[in-house]
Amino acid sequence: LLRNSAAMSGLGFDPESERTITRALTTIIESGGRRKAAAINYLIEGDVSTAAEAIEEVARDQSDASHETRKAAATSWREAGALYYSSSIEKAVLSYESMFNAALELQPQSERLATALRGLGAVAKLRGDYAAARSYLSRSMLIAEESNVQREIILDLLLFGAVARAQG
């Protein structure tokens, strides 16, 4: 939807940011909820920062609710982090840290925790902090291997490769 919209093509995002935003939009649509509809509208209009703020607000509210709703908060924090990744690295870090904390509280050795650690690793890579990126990715990989979640293992390996390539 967003990839083919006039809004996306006119914003001048690099291909990696376009893919990140498109993945975030897909996740937001799949997770549903009327409160996230505003974020979808902001994305369609091309306002990524406001969309991320709307998702972050949902995540904060979900974090304060019941145990089951806090699971949804981890997903919302991931969505906000993915959106902020293309517009504000500092806010992406905060979102991924919030996801990490939510996942740690819910289930210390979970796929969500591995995803949060990988998000922090991706942000560290963008900052040029390759040692931190490798550290986050190593922790994510350990959890993914212990949980035998192939998708997480593959994503970690891909990001490890990107870190190695960026280092030169």
Image (cartoon, rainbow, N blue to C red):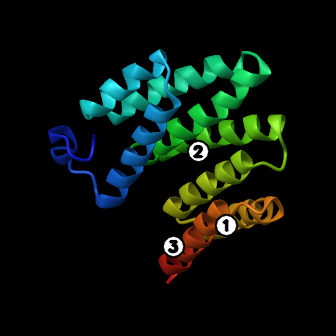
Q: Secondary structure at mark 1?
A: helix
Which dot marks residue 138? none
Of the numbered discs 3 and 2, the one sitting upstream in the chain is 2
Residue lying at 83% horizontally and 41% vertically, measured from the top left: 107
Which dot marks residue 93? 2
Amino acid on which disc 1 is placed: Ile
The residues bearing labels 2 and 1 have C-alpha atoms spaced at a distance of 21 Å
Amino acid on which disc 3 is placed: Ala
Amino acid on which disc 2 is placed: Val
Of the numbered discs 2 and 1, the one sitting upstream in the chain is 2
Q: Secondary structure at mark 3?
A: helix
Indicate the quadrant where residue 103 lies: top right
Q: Residue furthest bottom?
A: 168
Closer to the eye: label 3 or 2: 3
The residues bearing labels 3 and 2 have C-alpha atoms spaced at a distance of 19 Å
Left or right of 102 on screen, residue 159: left
Which dot marks residue 153? 1
